[in-house]
Structures are given as structure tokens and as C-alpha cells.
Image (cartoon, rainbow, N blue to C red):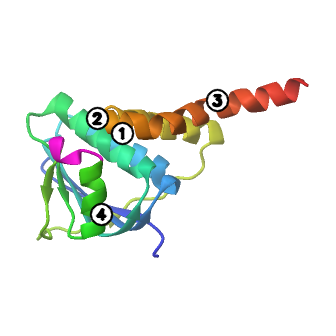
Amino acid sequence: MQEGKILIAENRGVYVLKFIGDVRLTLCSTIDALLKKIFGGEDFKSVVIDLTETEGIDSTALGFLAKIAVNTQEVSSRKPTIVSTREDITRVLSSMGFEHYFCLRDWPLALDYSLEEAPVLDDECADSIRQKVIDAHRTLMGLNPQNQEEFEPVVFALENCTLSREVKGVH
């Protein structure tokens, strides 16, 4: 599997994020920075996530996609769009309830402007990354009861891993 990367383009407030390869936890700081850029400005109109070249996507990246849906709802009446031509990826999106929060499309995009690779940010401390992962999973859990049930143990474990280390250090 190809290591994951993210390409981005913006045209008059419409943002396109293209996830390529295996999109995982290692890109959480990159995705978080992109979300701050997208939703931090006043020109936002909509966002399209292109997953046509995504080979794999983990729950952390799915949680960041859920954050896109939540943030979009706060500033726009339009749903964000996800383009997925891969049956396996589309099945994962459907199992998470994404069809209620996104317009899901199964045909590739035709863009007339170029995408640029987003810089990979990986210089954050473990606690900062852990908090981003927790937040992403909490957002994903909020989409539906099935996600709540599936990811609650993950969030619980992540929230308590620091506590375990601190208790071990006391003995």
C-alpha cells in the first residue's frame, strides 16, 4: 500500500482534499491543520473530499472527515461531498453513517485547477496527537449510536493511557 498523502486545492471558497494511499493516524496533524485553514477563513463555501485514490483509511481519518461534516453544518446549509469510486471505501463510509452528513458520489472529479501536496506535520508531542485522535473519535461517535458503541472503548483506552503511566510512575 502506498503511504498516505493529502493534496489540496481551493477555488473561491470551494476546497478539495484528495486523500491518496493509506490515510492513517500519521496524517492527523496534517488534516487538523487543513481543517483550521479551511474553516478559519471567511471565504468558505464548501468542501469536497476525493477518495478515489485512497487505498485504506483508518478510524482517526474517518473521525476527521466527521469533523468536516460537523464544521460545515455550523457555517453552511450545504453538505460536504465525498467522492469514492472504491467499493470497499464506500462500504466503510456507509457503515459509519456518512450518507446522512455528506453527499456521496461514485464518479471521479474533473478539476480545472491543480492540487498541491499538503505538508506532512509530525513534530507534535504524543499527548497532543493523542488528544487529536480522541477528538476525532468522539466526533465519529457522535454520528450515530453504532459508532458510539464501536469506538467508546477506543476513546476510553486513549483517555486512560496517561493515567496508567502516571500511576505506574508513582509506585
Instruction: State which region is magenta.
Output: 96-101
Q: Residue furthest left?
A: 77
Residue 12: where, in percent of width, then height? 12, 50
Q: Please name the amino acid that badge 2 sits on.
A: Asn
Q: Please name the amino acid that badge 4 sits on.
A: Ile
The residue depicted at 27 percent of the width and 42 percent of the height is 68
Q: CA distance from mark 1 to mark 3?
A: 20 Å
Few, some or many residues within 10 Å of mark 1 (<14, 14–19, 20+): some
Q: Please name the amino acid that badge 1 sits on.
A: Asn
Secondary element under disc 2, as helix, strand or loop, is: loop
Q: Which mark is residue 160?
A: 3
Task: Note whether 107 is above or below 17 in the view shown.
Answer: below
Q: Quadrant of residue 58?
A: bottom left
Q: Are marks 2 and 3 in contact (CB under 8 Å)?
A: no
Q: CA distance from mark 1 to mark 2?
A: 6 Å
Q: Which mark is residue 89?
A: 4
Judged by depth in the image, the label closer to the viewer, 1 or 4, is 1
Pick the residue in front: 22 or 10: 22
Do we see residue 52 in this rendering? no
Few, some or many residues within 10 Å of mark 2 (<14, 14–19, 20+): some
Which callout, 4 or 3, points at the residue further toward the start of the chain? 4
Q: Which residue is mark 1?
A: 147
Q: Which residue is mark 2?
A: 144
Q: The C terminus is located in which quarter? A: top right
Secondary element under disc 1, as helix, strand or loop, is: helix
Judged by depth in the image, the label closer to the viewer, 2 or 3, is 2
Q: CA distance from mark 4 to mark 3?
A: 31 Å
Residue 170: where, in percent of width, then height? 87, 23
Q: Are marks 4 and 2 in contact (CB under 8 Å)?
A: no
Which callout, 2 or 3, points at the residue further toward the start of the chain? 2
Task: Note whether 150 is above or below 94 in the view shown.
Answer: above
Q: Which mark is residue 114?
A: none
